[in-house]
Image: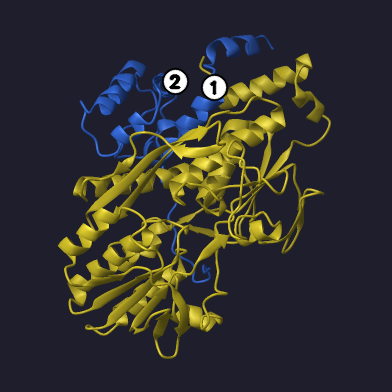
Chain colours: A yellow, B blue
Amino acid sequence: MTIDRRNFLKLGSAAALLTGCSPLLRAAGRPKPRVVVVGGGYAGAAAAKYLKLWGGNTVDVVVVEPSSQFVSCPLSNLVLGGSKTIDDLTFSYAALKKNHDLQWVRDSVVAIDPERKKLVLGRSDFGYDKLILAPGVDFIYDALPGLESDAARKQVPHAWKAGEQTVNLRRQLESMPDDGVFVMSIPKAPYRCPPGPYERACQVAFYFKQHKPKARIIVLDANPEIVSKKGLFTKAWADLYPGMIDYRPNSAVIEVDVAGQTVMTEFESIKGDVLNVIPPQRAGIPAQLVQANNIDKRWCEVDFLTYESMVVPHVHIIGDAVSAALPKSAHMATSQARVCANAVLAALTEQPIDASPVFANTCYSYVSDHMAMHVANVYRYNQAKKIMLSAEGGGVSDAPSELEADYARYWAQNIWSDVLT
Amino acid sequence: MCISGSAFAQTPQYSPHIQVLAASCAACHGTDGNSVGGTPVLAGLDSLHFIRQMKAFRSGERPATVMQRHAKGLTEDEIVGLAAFFATQPRVAGKLPPSVKLEPSHDH
């Protein structure tokens, strides 16, 4: 007879109850510890799944997520390029919920009381033993006059959270004049998905090349240079889309004239037929509610062994909201989620935790519909500095290839399977 | 409850370090190494084969797109630990999540 880990845990806890030598015994008279995960993106979904996969029946897991659907940000630039539809990237949470016996609450967090360990949602209240926030990012529109209203944000979409915004931008590109100008802006790093904006320029260029070869793209980058895969993107733009992409570094957008279809930087005003302003970002609202975003009032400082906030005890934060020398990618979000899940379970059962976490990041960017390239690194906990540092051997592709586009597809299928089934 | 004794004897004990590290491979190789396709299934893979491949990725003897980067970032002990972990994972068919149409209300 083989016994998998889950059954082993069940047997283990049953045995512990009989022998009376485990802390679990103390929980016997009261309900199981409850872990609440706020957010059902890559980080939150992975945390919920692995809490149950590794914790089995020793823990109740509740997920709070306002959306009924999961829409993948990775690959969503391909919707702009035309080789994917948004429906290709949209999934139900049904399998995840059912397979792992998760309690799922479709609601938003209104308030968090970390001292009483209580969550106030739109329609109900929830107590918790452990709280994991996977809040994603929130857009900072304060420094972008002109984009205050919902109507303005619809006319000048960010398309930086996949969904209706992505479809909106694709429609605008389709109805743009054939010789039109597409203007996109990139905020100063750190922001979600470092190579994403440059991949976006490739995908829009891919669409223009086929359907509007006279169209042009102006990329206004607040950063002094391309943030990720610089050499590869520069070469891809020159080789695949010569003369089409006008890249302007050190060009932060400071104002938008929506009616005049114009964006302003410190130095110039640029008119476009379609505008796409990706605003600066900070930790999502649930993290702001507990003031866990203590770094520049934007990102959350955490203990990299547990992902517990350094400023709000007993509140764990994972994913893009975390302040770290780690890329804000989907793979990183899931890796952080699993370190956190392990640490939370260890704390609840008084088991040892992983004292030196190591995890990998693989991130692909598509330069066309069938060519992609990677950046890949292993990150290792540094005991002295108490942070995650890049290990040896990391780096980027020599060149984009069809083979890597296959691997990019396998990556997407496997990470979707991992977090959503 | 005599079964609990045999459970200890039969169930491989993974350190939390190896368990968490192995889970990081899931983005490309599926949960517990059960890939949905394309990338190799690591669940149930012979541990010696796993170790040989990782060493070949490290040395460059086996050319790869990304695996050389991951193999070089790990210690020998971690490679051995991962080999033992994946070798004992049951093979189950990895599945894609259910696809749905985007609801118009889904907006951020």
Q: Quadrant of residue A81?
A: bottom left
The reply to whether residue A368 is visible in this rendering is: no
Residue A56, disc: none
Q: Are marks 2 and 1 in contact (CB under 8 Å)?
A: yes
Residue under the image location 37 percent in, 82 percent down? A268
Residue B67 percent coordinates (x, y): 30, 34
| Numbered disc 1: secondary structure | loop
Q: Which residue is denoted by mark 1 in the rendering? A: B15
Residue A221 percent coordinates (x, y): 37, 68
- Position of A226 with respect to A325 (left or right) is left
Residue under the image location 51 percent in, 46 percent down? A95
Q: Quadrant of residue A72?
A: bottom left
Amino acid type, residue under disc 2 in the picture: Gly
Q: CA distance from mark 2 to mark 1?
A: 9 Å
| Numbered disc 2: secondary structure | helix
Question: Looking at the image, which residue sits at the far bottom?
Answer: A260
**In the rendered image of this protein, does residue A181 appear above or below residue A401?**
below
Q: Which residue is denoted by mark 2 in the rendering? A: B81
Q: Within 10 angstroms of label 2, few (less than 14), some, or many (20 or more) residues? A: many
**In the rendered image of this protein, does residue A314 appear above or below residue A222?**
above
Residue A154 percent coordinates (x, y): 47, 79
**In the rendered image of this protein, does residue A92 appear above or below residue A81?**
above
Q: Within 10 angstroms of label 1, few (less than 14), some, or many (20 or more) residues? A: some
Give the quadrant of the N terminus of chain B. Answer: top right
Residue A45 percent coordinates (x, y): 54, 47
